[in-house]
Amino acid sequence: MRDYSAQNKKAWEFDAYAFWIRHAGTPEERAAEDVKDPLKMLRRHAQYFDTFKGVRIANICGSCGKKAVPLALLGADVTVFDISEANKRYALEVAEAAGTQIEYVVGDVLEIDTDRYSDWFDVVFMEGGVLHYFHDIDEFMRIMHAILKPGGRIICSDFHPFTKISDSLNFQMPAMSYFSTEIFEGEMAHARFYDEEIRKTFPKCSYRKYTISEILNAMIRSGFTIRRFDEHPSWENEDLPGEFTAVGVKEAGGEE
């Protein structure tokens, strides 16, 4: 495991299970919400799926299972790849309480077994702040391409790069040049929910933030054909961009 991945793992396992209990409810409470209306729990991401039943989905950095469990309830075969054992514990308990199943693989996403999972998934799906945890976006996208079946689709939804220059999502992270390629240490997203004394003790994450062109060009270089690109308003200020979704296809017969 890369040094920065080990650093991020430490941050994402710090009080994580207890955090999910406090902010998402007990596994039983969360499961009840998922079961009641799984499409609602997917929110805007539901529109990017043509169907769910029988679809083999890789949920990259799927965290506490907030999207994986609803997808499974809708009939998908979901495998979560994530770095945190604490996230796995919560996600599997929610899935069990919801009466469904997900597979959960803990480890560095850049070390996914591409022999086992080569051309395996119908959809690679990520959302909610993933790309900035990886220092080499080309390597990341090559792995995403490798684990998709020919004709498979990547749904890459993430924080908008505008957040590099403006804290439009209120993550309390420092602004920088939009074109900065700096690798820097910063708080993980949940730290802001803790009081100041505990917040000081939080392990830091290692980040590399990208521009829109860096993200899209990495997808293209890896072999994806971009089919759709949407920008979404910030939940803090709808006049500012907060997130985006890029959809790409691994063309049949394309390069690996």
Image: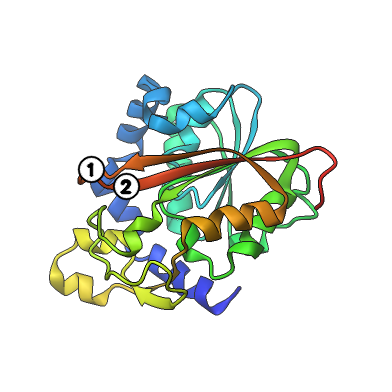
Q: Residue at x 45, y 77 (%)?
A: 183
Q: Residue at x 54, y 61 (%)?
A: 214
Q: Choose between 95 and 183: the one closer to the eye.
A: 183
- Quadrant containing the N terminus is bottom right
- Where 131 falls versus 148 (above or below)? below
Asked if residue 13 shows in the view, the reply is no
Q: Amino acid at mark 1?
A: Asp
In the image, is 16 to the left or to the right of 74? Answer: left
Quickly name the residue at label 2: 241
Please rate how many residues cluster around mark 1, counting C-alpha atoms within 10 Å: few if below 14, some from 14 to 19, many from 20: few
Identify the disc placed on residue 61.
none
How was this image coloured? rainbow
Mark 1, secondary structure of its residue: loop
Q: Residue at x 20, y 71 (%)?
A: 198
In the image, is 240 to the left or to the right of 210? Answer: left
Quickly name the residue at label 1: 239
Q: Give the image location of residue 220, x and y in percent.
A: 66, 52
Q: CA distance from mark 2 to mark 1?
A: 7 Å
Asked if residue 20 shows in the view, the reply is yes
